[in-house]
Image: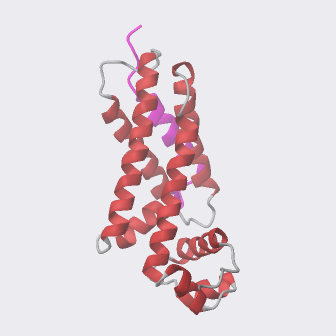
Amino acid sequence: MARPRKFDEQQVLDTAREQFWSGGYAATRMEDIAEATGLGKGSLYGAFGGKQELFHRVFDDYCGSVVDAVSRQLRGDDANAYARLSAHVYAVAAATAADTAHRGCLLAKGAAELAEHDETVAKRARAAIEALQALLEGDIAACQRNGDIAADVDPGKLAALVLAVLRGIEALGKAGASEETLTDIAWTALAVLPRPAR
């Protein structure tokens, strides 16, 4: 009979996430994670498998939390859809500017480093991006129903554009772009969305 674990699995995953996020996958050693969590390497391997399996757990957990957070920000009634979209776009710019360590987004970072050679990471990243685009599309469609965005434009295409801008804001922030620049990009992205003819 296996002995019960004497550690908080989610806390270990959170600590491992910080290690992978700060150093990247290749530069992070299981020894680093063992030291940060206070667990022996044997306990880590026993609970999570090797480094790749642990990263897959961390990456899946992170992607799910990002999609859940955006879902909470964008879901609601049609009357407030544009306010939610605007708040979300500005929040991404503000959070990116506040990331003074320039760590960027673990979704983008992990995909950039591993997706070419790791199908599990590639599939999870793709699923997260598709989910984020679907959430944006749903909110933009609500904006169209409420008369805030022109109804004759495909909401899926507008969602793809907004998502590309948000990912670009994160990339520019990682490269050190100023808060003013990121906020200006957010403003412009919202300003170019087509409005209904009055």
Q: Is residue 148 above or below residue 135?
A: above
Magenta residues? 173-198
Where residue 188 appears, as percent x and y from the top left, is 47, 35
Where residue 12 appears, as percent x and y from the top left, is 63, 75
Tell me what residue is drawn at x 57 percent, y 92 percent. Answer: 42
Task: Tell me, yes or no, whether the highlighted magenta stretch contains residue 159.
Answer: no
Quadrant of the drawing holding the C terminus:
top left
Of residues 58 and 165, which is closer to you in this image?
A: 58
Where residue 62 appears, as percent x and y from the top left, is 52, 61
Tell me what residue is drawn at x 56 percent, y 31 percent. Answer: 84
45 left or right, relative to 160: right
Of residues 52 and 99, which is closer to you in this image?
A: 52
Note whether residue 175 is visible.
Answer: no
Quadrant of the drawing holding the N terminus:
bottom right
Q: Is residue 150 above or below residue 137?
A: above
Note whether residue 13 is visible.
Answer: yes
